[in-house]
Image: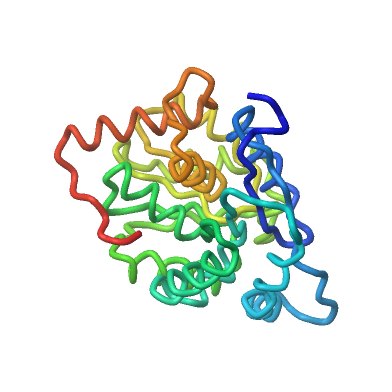
Amino acid sequence: MALHSAPRLGVVVPSGNAAAEPEIGSLVSPEFNVHTSRFPVLPGKDLRGRLEKYNDLLPEVLGNFGGLRLDATVVSCTGSHYLLTPEGDRALCAELSERAGAPVRSAALAILDTARAVGAERLVLISPYEPWLTELSRAYWESAGLGVDRVVKVRAGARFSPYDVTTGELVAQVREAELPEDAVLLFTGTGMFTFDALAELGRDGAHTLLTSNLASAWWARDTLGLPAEGADAHPLLRRLAERTGARSGAGSAVVASS
């Protein structure tokens, strides 16, 4: 597809997030062009204060795209949307979609969309968050109808820091947890690099592997009618597409939230 005529995907990210753009860009390339707007730096605010402020700033940050016509936009920050509950998240995204004249979806809702596609009813959270944010995440998923069987707390060294988790740390800590082969693993956080870890962990067994960025790309492709199982689709998307067929064929129930 010619660059000038390719669909345009907007991505809104926190200022320090280095993972969302390259991961989502890789997942939707070459069919999409990706355009980014960043939340402002908020000096003096702790993490929770920043997340709370992001929801207030979101209409302004989306407005920074100006006259650029976007076909869809994903808000690539799950933490701020955990504060809203799924119902509040859907209401906000519906309002933003109406303003923008094109679909706007949070990464958290995109995860719910993808969980529904694979027929997931229960999750194992792979969380690099601070404990309070992990609990907010758990509450969000459970409120949406997804059971959380277990939480694997991932550290970068001795700290909870999604941006700093290495592939080696992520793989080692997931493997140490000895998770059931049929588990659906959700790697939380848009700012944690996951591609290399997923490629390695995918060789371990039959786990269904979900991430915020993978789900965001899945939602964008599905919204604009581009199949994830296409020959040009990223291998992680094709692997996920295989899981949709396997789980639906097995009669798994569908998550009743979108």
Q: Quadrant of residue 50?
A: bottom right
In this view, the residue in front, 231 or 163, is 231
Q: How is the image coloured?
A: rainbow
In this view, the residue in front, 225 or 240, is 225
The x and y percentages for residue 210 are 45, 44
Task: Please state, as top left, top right, bottom left or bottom right, where the C terminus lies in the image.
Answer: bottom left
The x and y percentages for residue 227 are 43, 31
Q: Which residue appears farthest toward the top when viewing the image?
A: 231
Residue at point 45% right, 45% down? 223
Residue at point 26% right, 45% down? 119
In this view, the residue in front, 257 or 251, is 257
Q: Is residue 83 left or right of residue 5?
A: left
Total numbered badges shown on the rendered structure: 0
Instruction: Work out whether 236 lies above or below 80.
Output: above
Instruction: Work out whether 163 lies above or below 40.
Output: above
Q: Is residue 176 visible?
A: no
Residue at point 50% right, 30% down? 236
Task: Please state, as top left, top right, bottom left or bottom right, where the N terminus lies in the image.
Answer: top right
Q: Which residue appears farthest toward the left when viewing the image?
A: 251
The x and y percentages for residue 146 are 31, 60
The x and y percentages for residue 47 are 69, 74
